[in-house]
Image (cartoon, coloured by chain):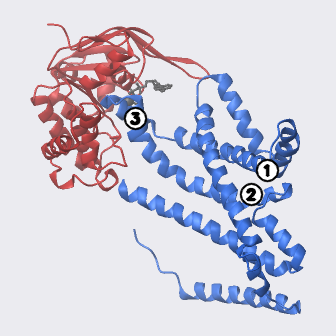
Chain colours: A blue, B red
Amino acid sequence: MYSQKLPLWYSIVAILLIGVFGIGLFQAFYGLDYDWDFSFLGDFFWDPKDDKPGLILLGLWGTIYISLISIVIGSGLGLLVGTLLITREPVTRFAAVFYVDVFRNTPVLVQLYVVYFIVGTAIEMSPETAGILTLSLFCSAYVAEIFRGTLQEFEKGQIDAAKALGLTRWQTARHIIAPQALRRMLPPLIGQFVSLVKDSSLVSVISVVDLTKSAMNVVAVSFRSLETWFIIALIYFVLNLVLSTVGRKIEQRLRVSS
Amino acid sequence: MTPLINMESVSKSFATKTKVIEVLKSVSLEVQEGEIVCLIGPSGGGKSTLLRSINALEPINSGSITVCGQNLNQSAGAVQRVRRETGMIFQRFELFPHLSALENVAIGLVQVNKLSRSDADSRARELLQDVGLADHVNKYPANLSGGQQQRVAIARALATDPKILLCDEPTSALDPELVDEVTEILGKVAASGMTMLIVTHEMRFARQIADRVLFLDQGTIAEQGTAEDIFKAPKSERLKQFLKQIHF
Ligand SMILES: Nc1ncnc2c1ncn2[C@@H]1O[C@H](COP(=O)(O)OP(=O)(O)OP(=O)(O)O)[C@@H](O)[C@H]1O
Ligand SMILES: [Mg+2]
């Protein structure tokens, strides 16, 4: 592979444009004539009175906990639904396609309301359970699609070669398809997980204590919405940056070990 | 002597959305142990389908196929046993890209022949040495030339010690200068007494190696004979036409 060096002025133009944008942004905030003060947030991270985690840390834990459980359940369920998507039995396949379509073509917020207010009324359900259930179902629809796509695109030639060698179906799945499919699925899966962490903020509307709900509460008592939301955005950003980085590391690891 | 491969009135058709194509029309064929049979014929004539029906990669609609005493129609177990007794070489190599050359060759030894990892590795090394790739055992398929990949594929197919080697256009995806390194190895395999069925457009190779040449056209064996018969004294008009087109 060879790379051609780009002319230096490309970078100079880029720096200039970013500079202009940055100055504009700074001007806009400065023009607000707002007295920025982040110091009050410390108490919301760690409550000094009771010496225990404050609202924001509790919310962060809520977000991590809800996202993680939803990702795990959603992935498991997604693999199952994904297998049904490629079954030859038409009724099962149709049901699976319908399931995926429902969850991909309706807003998560609406799904959350339906699960909490309709299903949750029929069978007693806490807000946390309703939130985790909705996010898991939503996540599973996307995981199922990723799984189906990866398997259906898998080269038939390799499967023929494995069969011709005398490998059983299980051996082919385990030693030929799985390692390659896993590596191909990882980038879209990580993208899906990052999106799920962001979408988990919606559970705040049914009063589940997550990062977003905590931010609302902090704003309600401190009246400092600018600083609060700025920090909350930063926390989401760092959380997802960690997730993507871990994903990239695993991907590299799979590449090397193959 | 009972033939190693026995196909009796084998028919196969593919149904597409618009029509049904008859690819094999009541084909019968016997191949004796140690025999080298080359299949030639125009594109779409059913050569690949015939080859792939022998190890049940392509199910047939009617007729029967017996390979090494196993009737393929009988059970899934028979299919599995036949696949262990046959090796296959593909036009596009079909190596497993996530495995090194060594692992590609060893996987059949470990999974099918149940050798230990270390025994499989040393056997795989020998096989790769036999195809002239002793220096490339740890390379991945993406880093090997087409000719080298096909040689790994040959080593992989031979690893499980098959009685029959099925080759579907083993050299037609190769650059011209790489063809000889592959045909040379297939020649050695043939000389070792292997029973082989080879679909090829390399007429020079077919003439060298074949005990018998089959001309497959429109789903039937239109003509067969020794390489001399087929290439020097073609009888049917279609075969003459075909040989003229490929001007070897
Ligand atoms: N999976 C399939 N579905 C539908 N039609 C198929 C399929 N496989 C093969 N065919 C058709 O069957 C016919 C014979 O195909 P086959 O691959 O056996 O021919 P071939 O003699 O090997 O040709 P070539 O020299 O091009 O490889 C062709 O018309 C092909 O289009
Ligand atoms: Mg073919």
Q: Which residue corresponds to mark 2?
A: A199
At mark 3, the secondary structure is: helix
Q: Chain of mark 1?
A: A
Distance, label 3 to label 2, CA atoms, is: 37 Å
Q: Chain of mark 2?
A: A
Q: Is residue A53 above or below residue B26?
A: below
Q: Which residue corresponds to mark 1?
A: A108
Disc number for residue A172:
3
Residue at the left extreme of this rendering: B192
Residue type indicated by callout 3 = Thr
- In which quadrant will I find the N terminus of chain B? top left
Q: Earlier in the sequence, mark 3 or mark 2?
A: 3
Query: Which quadrant of the frame does ligand 1 lie within?
Result: top left
Pick whichever, A22 or B187, lies toward us. Answer: A22
In the rendered image, residue A192, in percent from the top left (x then y), is placed at 64, 54
Q: Is residue A155 above or below residue A59?
A: above
Contact, mark 3 vs mark 1 (Cβ under 8 Å): no
Identify the residue at horizontal 34%, vertical 53% (top origin): B142
Q: Chain of mark 3?
A: A
Few, some or many residues within 10 Å of mark 3 (<14, 14–19, 20+): some
Q: Is residue B121 above or below residue A231?
A: above
In the rendered image, residue A182, in percent from the top left (x then y), is placed at 49, 48
Give the left or right position of residue A46, taking residue A171 as reference: right
Identify the residue at horizontal 68%, vertical 23% (top origin): A91
Q: Is residue A86 visible?
A: yes
> Are discs 3 and 2 located on one and the same chain?
yes
